[in-house]
Amino acid sequence: MPKEYNFETRVQHIKHMVIKYVAEAAFESKLAETVLNIPQKIIPGNKPTMRCCVYKERAILAERIKVAMGLCGPDIVQVISIACDECAKGGYQVTDNCRGCLAHRCEAVCPRGAITFNEKQRAHIDVEKCVQCGKCSQVCPYAAVVNYRRPCENACQTGAIGMDEDGAATVRQQDCTVCGACVNQCPFGAIVEKSFVLETVELLKEARDNPNRKLVAVVAPSVAVQYKNVHVDQVVAGLLKLGFTHVTEAALGADMTAAREARELADKGTLMSSCCPAFVSLVRKKFPELAAQISETPSPMVMAAMHVKERLPGAKVVFIGPCTAKKAEAELAEVKPFIDNVITFEEMDALFDARNIDIAALEPVNVADASRYGRNFARSGGVATAVTKAMREESEGLEDSFEIKTCIAAGTEECIKTLRKAVYGRADGNFIEGMACVGGCINGPVSLRHLGGDIIPMLEKHAGEVKGRKILETAEKGAALRE
């Protein structure tokens, strides 16, 4: 079966091919002389496959290649303007539901006189006069006035998506939490996340050429749901074959985070989890008055990396996961000493392809560093469950223990609702677990697969393989660091 049929969308397939060819050339140290040929390798011939002409298709691919090479400016989430030209500008529009009624309530409430009527008495909105107040939509008895919004605007819950003078989408970085929802939802793949895959290739080449260099892959627990017919241990084998010298679970860092956050909650009385960087960014940008309630405990990614660098002084660490926001987190001054690079599961899969690694054919290499609770951090409610469990383990044998009441918010929209209540002291618990992705990290924007009927059972099976381990014992013991 051709490789492209393993992808959810054609956009995902194109991203894969771009990264594959860029990485392939970089591994062979031939990128400079071959990069201009990549668009034609992906779209051969003279017939367009998705745009008006093949030349525009290749021009867009050239921009994607710049993003894949990291030659696109500092922002993690950004727009390829030339690729963003197929969506209507949007705004309030009158549908065929309009009956040309006598009341004309829409006309009466419009503050700018933007509504007129044709010879059939059907309403029409002058987009030049309309100020998008929505009053006409609210009073129409037939619900004939609708607000058409672009997919990226619908996906973004923080108001970070705008438009430039040519109608192309823009990202207001001051409002962006780097959650990646717009990246996932854009039907044309015009909104992209900056890639650091070339940095990973260089680290892999350095480890290959220097026997003393240790290069560690810290893999997010949602790796368990990325492939339908490939076991996690085969992905581990693939990473070792790719050139990583060691592999460990970010879920171990999750155990460490849960243990520390449980103690922090008991000390402070109220707490917001620091695990999701997009949630943390949302609090700091939109609800700064609540920022003091964010846990001071590093995220599982950072906790795992700190542990690795303590065990292997001088090692380089690459985090691999389903998240765009982790790329932004890795740029923070307090995180940079521990995380050397971040790539996504999409990029990991492209690296396998670039090196002709068929992970389904590899002998498994077992990695079992974490507890089932750490592995379940990948799903909504997993953090809250782990912190509760860690608190109970901590208080075993004590007469008095802290009473924890968790509040779970999955998806940026739910997080905003929860935070609005918290502002007024009406939060539904003393420990808030916020995740920007609906369902949790298993539905991350740059996953190979997204929420489906088999996703939760696959994660539960993965977590069940280490059933019986205690969070505190696992966190204290640390990782075996498979090599």
Image (spheres, rainbow, N blue to C red):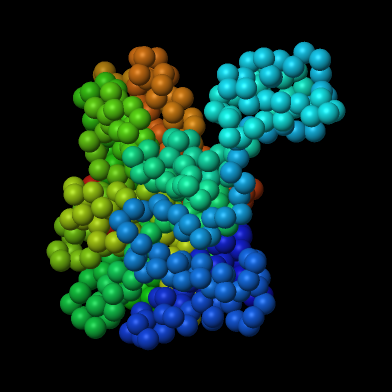
Residue 223 at least partly seen: no
* Residue 441 drawn at (x, y percent): 46, 46
Quadrant of the image for the N terminus?
Answer: bottom right
On screen, residue 230 above or below 407: below
Choose between 395 and 168: the one closer to the eye: 168
Q: In the picture provided, is 202 more to the left or to the right than 37?
A: left
- Going 25% across and 61% down the picture, which residue do you hit? 340
- How many numbered marks are there? 0
On screen, residue 367 above or below 47: above
Q: Residue furthest front?
A: 119
- Going 58% across and 19% down the picture, which residue do you hit? 111
Residue 420 at least partly seen: yes
* Residue 312 drawn at (x, y percent): 18, 64
Choose between 342 and 212: the one closer to the eye: 342
* Residue 26 drawn at (x, y percent): 36, 79
User: Which of the 4 image quarters holds residue 123?
Assistant: top right
